[in-house]
Amino acid sequence: MAPEKPTIYLLQAEDEYAATQFLHEMEGRVGEAGMGDLNTQYLDGRMINLEQLREEALTMPFLVERRLVIVDHPLALLNDETSRQKFLDCLAQVPPSTALVLVEHRLLSDIRERESGKKHWLENWIEENHPRAWMREFPLKRGQAMANWIIAHTKDLGGRIEPPAAERLSEIAGEDSRLAESEIHKLLDFVNYSRPIEIQDVDLLSPYNEKAGDFALINAIRQGDGHTASKALHQMLSEQDALLIFFSLVHQFRQILLARLALDEGQTPVEVGKTLGRFRISAYPARLALEQAQKFKLEELCQIYQRLFEMDISIKRGELDGEVALETLVVALTNPLPSR
């Protein structure tokens, strides 16, 4: 008898890039019969309610064995004990014909909490319902772990990199696997896959460049200034890859949205900084995010983030080119945002 497939998958996606690669593999299995688009549904827990989640989870697949439902930020659906229980009841009803993937962009419990037996309630539920429920962590790679991953991933791509070069690149990429991936491709193209990447190659092509404070494009978007936004975008495109710019915008708007939410809860600027710190946003970008958050209304940021979310899905599914996505985004966001 074939082993039972999980119906509930919990991805703790602190490393969003690694989790996205895993999701691509799942999407590929659903799409093998050419029915991927019809049997894959993306949801955002900040934009739906529990009844919508239940409806999608119980929908039967079309001409394939299983349907894939991916829910970003599922815990945003829950605001009290009653909603938590309804959420768990919904998970218990998911049929084997659905793979429901819950993606939280953080680790739900730290090492100390786990050692003391204080794991997050959702982790406990997953363990209690194994093998029907399954979870995987994607922790950020730091320091030597990032350098080791760079060496292994470069080899997977058909190239080689010397350990000192991998260590230098890990210093530049920090915890950003997506940035490291982009730089590896660029470096491999530079050496034409014919020799190992050396430290001088990294210094030449991947110099450290702290642009955390570059909000020129976001400022123009906020002001509805399409001309200035387009000019800022083309300047950025002359220096950086389009996909890196797009995901940098997603990252920056996420920080601004978090800051705006904290402000709307009545937090002081100092408290907002501490809140952002819990999301591993350091002091300098946190201060910049706070400054920007004061210039936006929460409704505006939610609508912008929803547009980014939809474009992110289109890019990941190969439906939208990175540069086209950015041009479209600038046009869309510098026009008046419709009220809901």
Image: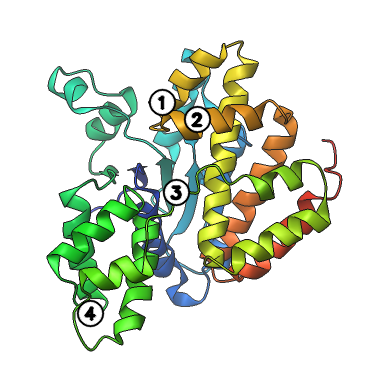
The answer to whether residue 45 is visible is no
Q: Which residue is mark 3?
A: 210
- Separation (CA) of disc 1 from disc 2: 8 Å
Name the mark nearer the viewer: 3 or 4: 3
Badge 1 crowding class, 10 Å Cα cut-off, few under 14, some 14 to 19, many 20 or more, is: few
Q: Earlier in the sequence, mark 4 or mark 1?
A: 4
Amino acid type, residue under disc 4 in the picture: Gly
Is 197 or 111 nearer to us in this picture? 197
Name the mark nearer the viewer: 4 or 2: 2
Name the mark nearer the viewer: 1 or 3: 3
The image's mark for residue 286 is 2
- Separation (CA) of disc 4 from disc 1: 37 Å
Amino acid type, residue under disc 3 in the picture: Glu
Mark 1 near mark 2, Cβ–Cβ under 8 Å? yes
Q: Earlier in the sequence, mark 3 or mark 4?
A: 4
Q: Which residue is mark 1?
A: 277
The image position of residue 62, as x and y in percent, is: 55, 65
Badge 4 crowding class, 10 Å Cα cut-off, few under 14, some 14 to 19, many 20 or more, is: many
> Which element is circle 2 on?
helix
In the rendered picture of this protein, how many numbered marks are placed on residues? Answer: 4
Residue positioned 34% across, 82% down in the render = 190
> Which element is circle 4 on?
loop
> Which element is circle 3 on?
loop
Badge 2 crowding class, 10 Å Cα cut-off, few under 14, some 14 to 19, many 20 or more, is: many
Q: Which residue is mark 4?
A: 159
Residue positioned 61% across, 10% down in the render = 266
Rendered view: 155 above or below 275? below
Is 264 or 271 nearer to us in this picture? 271
Rendered view: 100 above or below 322? above
- Separation (CA) of disc 4 from disc 2: 37 Å
Q: Earlier in the sequence, mark 1 or mark 3?
A: 3
Name the mark nearer the viewer: 3 or 2: 3
